[in-house]
């Protein structure tokens, strides 16, 4: 029993890293409808939105796990991402799959037990889009950006449902455009990193179909005659 506990303790830190808790700040988009819907003083709306936030954190960790499983071989060739738990061998693929299933089970249990039915479909769409993204859609230029942006829009929609607030067209459009900008900036940073470290030969699938001229906002502004 002691050896088993020791192995579980040894696996705990890599699994936490696999879950990427530092990315949970993205799930704060759930609270935007509470803020703009003037429901900050509504304890019921805050309680339900907080539960949706926590559930989205677990669901996002499940998505990161699947993403790392599909990226394992590519990550091993990356000077920084090779240190990720799966790429480094700290966590096996089987352990990662079991971790994914546990996270999804907890999300399903919490959703059925505590959340409105309409939020279940949002979680399902989010999970479905991201699984499709991890296995195929990330290789399709432009479509991959829409997949990433849709995750933020779904967070806002879940927050609107939990706070019983109407999700206006304005907040949906602005969330989508902001997340699209962040996705383009991430692609640009990846391209700059690849070029500066001369990894053009080991191009990641997510960068296929992109180049610096395409994703550079400064170049786009210069082309249209607008000063950055």
Image: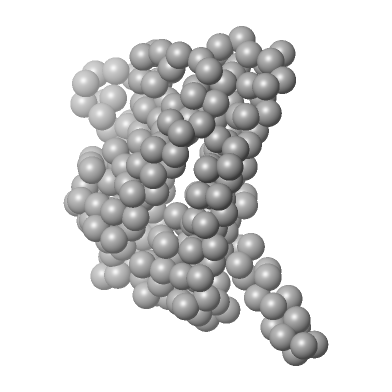
Q: Position of residue 163 (x, y in %)?
A: 57, 21
The one nearer the camera, 180 or 56, is 56
The one nearer the camera, 101 or 66, is 101
Q: Is residue 200 above or below residue 155?
A: below
Q: Position of residue 164 (x, y in %)?
A: 53, 18
Q: Is residue 158 above or below residue 197?
A: above
Query: Is residue 209 shown left or right of residue 104?
Result: left
Query: Is residue 20 shown left or right of residue 142?
Result: right
* Res 30 quadrant in image: top right
Number of residue marks: 0
Q: Quadrant of the N terminus?
A: bottom right
Q: Position of residue 89 (x, y in %)?
A: 52, 81
Q: Is residue 149 above or below residue 10?
A: above
The one nearer the camera, 161 or 172, is 161
Residue located at (20% from left, 51% from top): 140
* Res 103 quadrant in image: bottom right
Residue 163 in view: yes
Residue located at (46% from left, 70% from top): 97
Q: Is residue 38 above or below residue 211?
A: above
The one nearer the camera, 153 or 2, is 2
Residue located at (30% from left, 70% from top): 202
Q: Quadrant of the C terminus?
A: top left
């Amino acid at each position: 029993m002691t050896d088993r506990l020791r192995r579980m303790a040894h696996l705990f830190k890599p699994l936490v890293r696999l879950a990427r808790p530092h990315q949970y700040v993205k799930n704060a988009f759930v609270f935007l409808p509470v803020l703009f819907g003037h429901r900050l003083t509504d304890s019921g709306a805050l309680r339900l939105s907080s539960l949706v936030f926590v559930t989205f954190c677990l669901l996002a960790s499940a998505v990161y796990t699947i993403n790392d499983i599909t990226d394992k071989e590519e990550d091993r060739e990356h000077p920084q991402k090779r240190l990720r738990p799966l790429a480094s061998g700290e966590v096996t693929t089987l352990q990662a799959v079991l971790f994914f299933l546990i996270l999804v089970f907890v999300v399903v249990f919490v959703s059925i037990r505590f959340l409105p039915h309409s939020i279940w479909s949002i979680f399902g769409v989010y999970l479905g889009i991201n699984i499709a993204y991890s296995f195929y859609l990330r290789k399709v230029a432009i479509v991959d950006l829409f997949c990433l942006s849709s995750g933020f829009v779904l967070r806002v929609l879940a927050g609107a449902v939990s706070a019983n607030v109407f999700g206006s067209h304005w907040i949906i459009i602005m969330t989508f455009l902001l997340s699209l900008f962040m996705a383009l900036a991430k692609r640009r940073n990846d391209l700059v990193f690849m070029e500066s470290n001369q990894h053009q030969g080991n191009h990641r699938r997510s960068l296929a179909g992109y180049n610096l001229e395409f994703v550079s906002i400064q170049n786009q502004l210069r082309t249209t005659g607008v000063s950055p």
